[in-house]
Image (cartoon, rainbow, N blue to C red):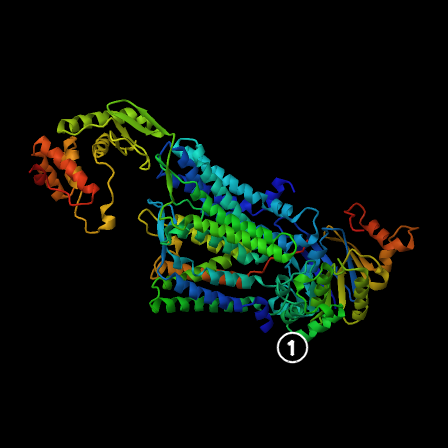
């Protein structure tokens, strides 16, 4: 498995988790007013919202480091192994979020763990359909999209935004887990596109 | 490569599907708060989505760079120069940026009912320069970083850089992002320097990165020149804005005031010219009542910049075309109070207040008592009503002594004090 | 033992078939696979490598079918494939990449490393084994691809244009390698290089628009050349005679 691990460079996902940890601590409860389609033209958003992006990008980058045709015609179950690592990283991201929120640094960090799962799932789902560059852009783009159009007239976020909802929101938690599960399944099962055949 | 072919295979094609509708809605959203008929606001509205245009276009540029890298274009020894190859790849992205800005101008013109004027050119030029800079920065990043990371990092980085500092407590950083923090009004325009600073910063960095990718020899010279451009641009930009407050500096708008009518003469920005008769009617009614109360009526009522000097017989007023007639009368009446210093800035416990004379003016001008009472402090309302019971001379004496006290930040007198 | 295609059909898009009702058996020995651009050669090799699954029909080797999950593992262990486009993982050296492919094919880590060293030596890339794959030239990259197919000692090699981009000396090395493999490994190879066809290959298959146009021994193929063809151009002439009217951009 060391050859697979070295090819994927999974240690980068550990770096992503570290950056997530520092980003969560650094962001804390800091807020910023971002442009939004609300009655007042902007909305106050916690910077913690953006902290899961390093983990998400790290996972996508690592998954992209592959030999698609060789893995497709090989007998090693690299898909399962990838799924196992992604699940581990997702779990660790949740732990980091709980750690930061319970240490008193930022209560909103708890939601960041759920958001990490959602964004990872979204990224992996888009990756399976459109490729890895679109995947990273989709995860980041989702955050920009929800800040722009995710708030109602009463400045409360819609349920579909997932990442803007409170940490205790059950629906968002379920949606995040579902998205993560879908992305995970597509990562493990879907055959990568083959090139050079005509 | 023909332009249409370039565009067809470019990432700009996909980004356009997201960006153009977003620009339209963002401009319409911004224009909600702008003055209808104000040409400069059209350009500033079109500049508002710069954060979206720069973020998406720079991510596209990163993508294009990654595509060129992947196809090993740079090692194929092309006939064309590197600059030409890069320009060809980026042409669709630049076109998208220009189209987005152009669409913004159309949206703003449609919503505000006026074409953009020349004063808005600085805003548009600054926006275009900033977006082009970020396209170059994105392309440079895409040449060295794997595209799985580069495109999303650029998208997120530019988006956060251009939106978060606007609400930062660090004042100087707000003015460097390229997002226009302060909007021009019908009386004041944003200073030209506010548009230069972000261009210096992003342009300096972009030129530095572009030089790094060039073939200037030796390498050390190339690196030195590139670094110098980036550092000088950044420093100059910082020095320009280091002492600025939350808003960008403004200058009085010149050459845009029209005057008409008499007794009093009404001077307003040209955008409000159709409203002059309505303003004059309200002014005439109010001035008659104030004159009856003993106040000297002004020769002119003017809506001009606070930075513009006015004569002693000119009162500044601040009407809005959307105001009702009743609200207009309130505005005219309150123009009797001249510009006053902010006494609370040096003395948080300052006890003086203009609310008493404010209420008195409104009641004298004939504004409904209940309307005045609903807006006034009860104690100050009682002072105003008490003043109305005094003789005309005492009322005028109280009014002027209150103005003097407010100008010198000393305690404002009660009506009874003025009567004695 | 040979790869057998039984009534195989495949298409990349709905309603369009690249190969249809293909019945083909690559015999033992070295087989050269010819055909114009777009004939479906790479698709047939991809089906043989189990990278693609046929819409109908089956592909089998040595009793193992690609459609059966149970036997797919054994099938893949025995069949090696070099695709037309050689991928590279940024940052991996040639040796690391070849070893990774060996590991994917079921070798242990140690065997994969040793196999990679041996495979790279066979294609004369041992001096470059510690260079990053992304820094290699096009011809060197194709040799990495050949090494990837050799690393795990498969029983049959499916090679898609292995000599494209190789210099004449490297082509000679490659032909020598094929000679070394004769008797122990079956090779099916698609190419546009018809130099030394007679001395290198045993069988010829010509594919045209997804259909077999010719399948037989090399001598029979060469006999299709019109009378009077100069001896150095027999293969070319035979090919033209078989594919008359098709896309002739190969030679």
A172 over C183 or under it: above or below: above
Q: Eyeballing the image, is B380 above or below A185?
A: above
Residue B163 x, y percent position in the rendering: 41, 50
- Would you place residue B306 above or below residue C22 in this image? above
Residue B260 shown left or right of residue B75 in the figure: left
User: Residue farthest to the right?
Assistant: C228
- Local secondary structure at mark 1: helix
> Residue B110, position in %: x, y?
42, 33
Picture layout, residue C228 above or below residue A173: above
Residue A132 in percent (x, y) is at 55, 57
Chain ID, mark 1: C
Tell me if residue B130 can be seen.
yes
Residue at image position (67%, 76%) is: C111
Q: Which of B254 and C4 is in front in this view?
A: B254
Q: Position of residue B49 (x, y in %)?
A: 44, 44
Between C245 and A151, which is closer to the camera in this rendering? A151
Q: Can residue A185 be seen in this view?
A: no
Residue carrying label 1: C110
Residue at point 21% right, 51% down? B348
């Amino acid at each position: 498995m060391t050859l697979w691990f070295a090819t994927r460079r999974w240690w980068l996902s550990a770096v992503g988790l570290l950056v997530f940890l520092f980003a969560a601590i650094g962001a804390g409860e800091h807020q910023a007013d971002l442009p939004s389609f609300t009655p007042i033209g902007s909305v106050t958003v916690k910077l913690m919202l953006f902290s899961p992006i390093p983990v998400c990008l790290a996972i996508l980058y690592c998954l992209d480091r592959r030999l698609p045709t060789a893995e497709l015609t090989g007998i090693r179950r690299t898909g399962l192994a990838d799924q196992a690592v992604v699940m581990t990283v997702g779990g660790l991201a949740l732990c980091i979020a709980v750690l930061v929120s319970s240490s008193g640094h930022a209560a909103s960090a708890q939601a960041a763990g759920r958001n990490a799962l959602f964004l990872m799932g979204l990224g992996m789902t888009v990756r399976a359909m459109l490729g890895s560059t679109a995947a990273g852009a989709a995860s980041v783009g989702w955050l920009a999209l929800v800040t722009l159009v995710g708030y109602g007239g009463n400045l409360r976020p819609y349920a579909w935004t997932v990442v803007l909802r409170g940490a205790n929101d059950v629906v968002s938690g379920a949606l995040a887990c579902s998205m993560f599960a879908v992305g995970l399944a597509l990562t493990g099962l879907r055959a990568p596109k083959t090139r050079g055949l005509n | 490569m023909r332009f249409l072919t370039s565009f067809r295979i470019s990432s700009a094609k996909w980004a356009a599907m997201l960006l153009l509708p977003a620009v339209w809605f963002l401009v319409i959203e911004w224009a909600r708060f702008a003055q209808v008929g104000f040409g400069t606001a059209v350009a500033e509205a079109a500049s508002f989505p710069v954060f979206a245009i720069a973020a998406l276009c720079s991510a596209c540029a990163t993508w294009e760079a990654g595509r060129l890298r992947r196809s090993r274009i740079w090692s194929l020894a092309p006939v064309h120069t590197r600059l030409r190859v890069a320009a060809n790849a980026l042409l669709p992205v630049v076109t998208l940026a220009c189209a987005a800005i152009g669409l913004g101008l159309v949206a703003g013109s449609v919503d505000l009912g006026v074409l953009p004027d020349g004063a808005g050119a600085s805003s548009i030029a600054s926006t275009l320069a900033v977006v082009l800079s970020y396209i170059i920065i994105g392309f440079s990043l895409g040449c060295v970083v794997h595209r799985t990371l580069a495109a999303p990092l650029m998208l997120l980085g530019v988006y956060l850089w251009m939106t978060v500092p606007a609400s930062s407590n660090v004042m100087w950083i707000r003015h460097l992002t390229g997002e226009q923090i302060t909007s021009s009004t019908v009386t004041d325009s944003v200073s030209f320097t506010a548009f230069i600073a972000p261009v210096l910063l992003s342009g300096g960095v972009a030129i530095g990165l572009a030089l790094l990718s060039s073939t200037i020899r030796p390498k050390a010279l190339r690196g030195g020149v590139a670094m110098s451009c980036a550092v000088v641009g950044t420093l100059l930009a910082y020095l320009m804005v280091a002492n600025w407050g939350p808003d960008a500096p403004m200058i009085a708008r010149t050459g845009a005031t029209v005057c008409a009518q008499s007794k009093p003469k009404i001077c307003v920005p040209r955008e409000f010219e159709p409203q002059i008769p309505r303003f004059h009617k309200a002014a005439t009614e109010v001035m008659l009542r104030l004159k009856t109360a003993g106040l000297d009526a002004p020769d002119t009522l003017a809506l001009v910049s606070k930075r513009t000097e006015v004569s002693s017989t000119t009162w500044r007023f601040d009407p809005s075309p959307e105001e009702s007639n009743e609200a207009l009368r309130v505005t005219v009446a309150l123009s009797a109070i001249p510009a006053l210093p902010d006494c609370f800035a040096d003395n948080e416990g300052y006890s003086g207040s203009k609310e008493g004379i404010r209420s008195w003016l409104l009641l004298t001008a004939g504004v409904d008592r209940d309307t005045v009472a609903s807006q006034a402090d009860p104690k100050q309302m009682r002072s105003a009503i008490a003043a109305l019971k005094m003789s005309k001379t005492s009322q005028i004496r109280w009014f002027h002594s209150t103005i003097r006290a407010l100008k010198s930040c000393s305690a404002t007198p009660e009506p009874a004090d003025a009567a004695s | 033992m040979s790869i057998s295609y039984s009534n195989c059909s495949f298409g990349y898009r709905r309603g369009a078939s690249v190969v249809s009702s293909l019945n083909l058996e690559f015999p033992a020995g070295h087989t050269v696979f010819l055909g114009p651009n777009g004939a479906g050669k790479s698709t047939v090799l991809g089906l043989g490598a189990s990278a693609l699954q046929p819409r109908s029909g089956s592909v089998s080797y040595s009793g193992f079918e690609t459609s059966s999950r149970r036997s797919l593992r054994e099938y893949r262990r025995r069949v090696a494939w070099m695709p037309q486009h050689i991928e590279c993982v940024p940052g991996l050296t040639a040796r690391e990449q070849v070893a990774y492919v060996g590991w994917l094919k079921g070798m242990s880590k140690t065997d994969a490393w040793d196999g990679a060293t041996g495979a790279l030596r066979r294609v004369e890339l041992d001096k470059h084994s510690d260079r990053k794959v992304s820094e290699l030239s096009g011809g060197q990259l194709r040799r990495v691809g050949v090494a990837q197919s050799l690393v795990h000692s498969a029983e049959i090699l499916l090679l898609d244009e292995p000599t494209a981009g190789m210099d004449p000396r490297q082509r000679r090395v490659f032909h020598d390698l094929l000679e070394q493999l004769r008797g122990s490994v079956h090779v099916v190879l698609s190419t546009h290089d018809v130099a030394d066809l007679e001395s290198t290959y045993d069988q010829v298959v010509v594919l045209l628009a997804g259909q077999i146009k010719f399948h037989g021994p090399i001598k029979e193929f060469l006999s299709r050349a019109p009378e009077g063809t100069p001896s150095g151009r027999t293969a070319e002439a035979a090919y033209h005679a078989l594919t008359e009217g098709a896309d002739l951009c190969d030679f």
